[in-house]
Amino acid sequence: MTVSVEPTDPTNAYTSTTATATATVTVTGSAGAAAAADAEALRPHAEHAFAAELAALAAQDDRPRPARWKMSPWAVATYLLGGTLPDGTVITPKYVGPRRIVEVAVTTLATDRALLLLGVPGTAKTWVSEHLAAAVSGDSTLLVQGTAGTPEEAIRYGWNYAQLLAHGPSRDALVPSPVMRAMAEGMTARVEELTRIPADVQDTLITILSEKTLPIPELGQEVQAVRGFNLIATANDRDRGVNDLSSALRRRFNTVVLPLPESPDAEVDIVARRVDQLGRSLDLPAVPEGIEEIRRVVTVFRELRDGVTADGRTKLKSPSGTLSTAEAISVVTGGLALAAHFGDGVLRAGDVAAGILGAVVRDPAADRVIWQEYLETVVRERDGWKDFYRACREVSA
């Protein structure tokens, strides 16, 4: 016997920019109020933030679509990588990296294998996961956040205990997990930080991914996945040994490794684009005026991360932190806020110096020595970096 899970009020993000006000404290039921609430969201979901692009792609997409997909695999890849449509609509890139990586990820979701996005911190695993789910299913919110305390119920189902005590196990008392909802509705579920979830909870996914069914023994029923269902998981490859995936579970995934940006220019472009998006939501100054400071932040992070200067002449010690692209975005965004509220609105060396120090010096003993050595042997001698050197020396004192 199977049991159906009633879908929540779905919003077609491709044909309307009105979003369900799931994050507001008071839900009025008014479409206008819901749209206003979404406009005020600090970070709208991908399907809302890029609703116009998704709608344009879906409208012009005449290629075959897998069951219950909002658009074809080609259109999903175009949404992530960017491009210009025949009618002139510009699709902004959401991921800057090798095209084949995105194509493999999208193709995996069109098969019966789940997708595991693996990489060091800050390689846009969560970002890619969200945008893939938004493009494929029109809903990126079917999410399980992995932590050391994630219970089995977060992946399978839970119970409304008031109903359970009053009437015993019943369909009305069952609380579906995001994964169960995705199975019943033929959508894409997401599991973040899979390797942080305890191993016995991870293995709950084995039956779901292999048999495409979720038993409910308390009711003598099951939920069978309908066509269109799949799952995207992310994992940090620096967490190996925390909760390694069992071989049985790993076989259920097709693993795609997201690399760090290949070139400084690519990383500067990624940081500038993302900071510009964040800055607009926070009413911060435009990025172009601070592009040189962004380039300096990226240069520092790449050199310390790689253990060698850009010209290859000087070997460096690497600090304990990851110094990822995501951290560079955070440093520059913080610097823009300083420039906007306590400066003249233009991003300068003094605005990013404290953020860089905080990102580099994670271990106060070892990392501080590495940072001071880098300042004196590299930054101090670099042409055009005197202001940067002084600003970093000042906050490091």
Image: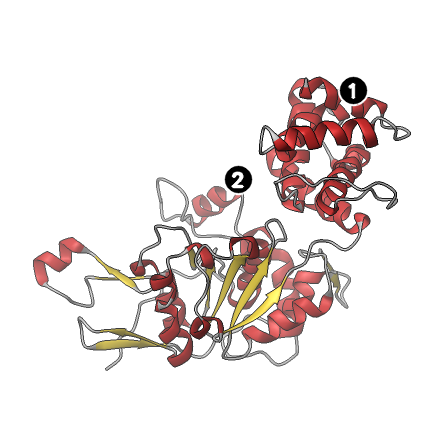
For the point 9% across and 62% down, the residue is 167
* Coordinates of residue 166 in the picture (x, y in percent): 8, 57
Q: CA distance from mark 2 to mark 1?
A: 35 Å
**Secondary-structure class at tag 1:** helix
In this picture the colour scheme is secondary structure
**Secondary-structure class at tag 2:** loop
* Coordinates of residue 110 in the picture (x, y in percent): 55, 77
The disc labelled 1 sits on which kind of residue? Arg
Q: Earlier in the sequence, mark 2 or mark 1?
A: 2
Identify residue for label 1: 390
Question: Which quadrant would the C terminus be assigned to in this image?
Answer: top right
* Up-down relation of residue 2 to residue 237 (above or below): below
Identify residue for label 2: 42
The disc labelled 2 sits on which kind of residue? Leu
For the point 31% across and 67% down, the residue is 6
Using the rendered image of the protein, determine whether residue 283 is visible from the camera's viewpoint: no
* Up-down relation of residue 65 to residue 12 (above or below): below
- Label 2 neighbour load within 10 Å: few <14, some 14-19, many 20+: few
* Coordinates of residue 57 in the picture (x, y in percent): 65, 66
* Up-down relation of residue 82 to residue 122 (above or below): below
For the point 52% across and 59% down, the residue is 234
